[in-house]
Amino acid sequence: MRKTTPTHRAILWLQEHGWQAFKVEYHAFGRAHDLMGFADIFAYKDGRIAFVQVTSLTNVAARRSKVEANEHATALAPYYDVLVLGFKPKETVPRHAKQWTGNEWVDWEGL
């Protein structure tokens, strides 16, 4: 069986919940580049837009810090869902789903 990445699992999970989800990170020069420096996935559903940073459950704290420090994430957060999803290996449902509001993390209720 082919190993799936947390990003692939996040896209499938979002799609299962009615979101249109697209990978927006790309690889060049031997490393990954996120959209605006923080987003791996762009998704939308029923007029809502989400920018999603995906990681393993063990890296959630680092990714939350990355989002908090990103000027684009903070500027977009009042208007769109800016999320961090954390997955355990091989699991298809994130154990961590939090939304950055621009000044605090809250449980994401976008499903």
Image: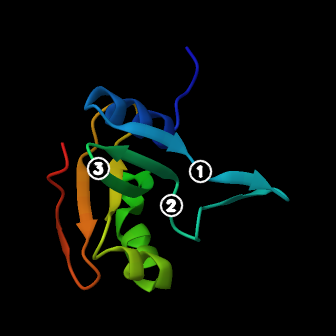
Name the residue at 58% across, 70% down: 36
Of discs 3 and 1, which sits in the foreground?
A: 3
Residue 104 lies, in percent from the top left, at 21, 80
How many numbered marks appear? Answer: 3
For marks 3 and 1, the one nearer the N-term is 1
Q: Is label 3 in contact with label 2 (beta carbons under 8 Å)?
A: no
Secondary structure type for disc 2:
loop
Q: Nearer the viewer, residue 38 or 2?
A: 38
The disc placed on residue 101 is none
Dot 1 crowding, Cα within 10 Å, few <14, some 14–19, many 20+: some
Secondary structure type for disc 3:
loop
Q: Which residue is mark 3?
A: 47
Secondary structure type for disc 1:
loop
For marks 1 and 2, the one nearer the N-term is 1
The answer to whether any part of residue 91 appears in the image is no
For marks 3 and 2, the one nearer the N-term is 2
Taking the image as shown, residue 82 lies to the left or right of residue 8, namely left
Name the residue at 43% across, 75% down: 73
Residue 25 lies, in percent from the top left, at 62, 53
Q: Nearer the viewer, residue 71 or 44?
A: 44
Q: Which residue is mark 2?
A: 39
Q: Is label 1 in contact with label 2 (beta carbons under 8 Å)?
A: yes
Q: Which residue is mark 1?
A: 24
Mark 3: which amino acid? Gly
Q: CA distance from mark 3 to mark 1?
A: 19 Å
Name the quarter where the N terminus is drawn: top right
Q: Nearer the viewer, residue 97 or 23?
A: 23
Name the quarter where the C terminus is drawn: top left
Of discs 3 and 2, which sits in the foreground?
A: 3
Residue 76 lies, in percent from the top left, at 39, 74
Name the residue at 34% across, 52% down: 86
Q: CA distance from mark 3 to mark 2?
A: 19 Å
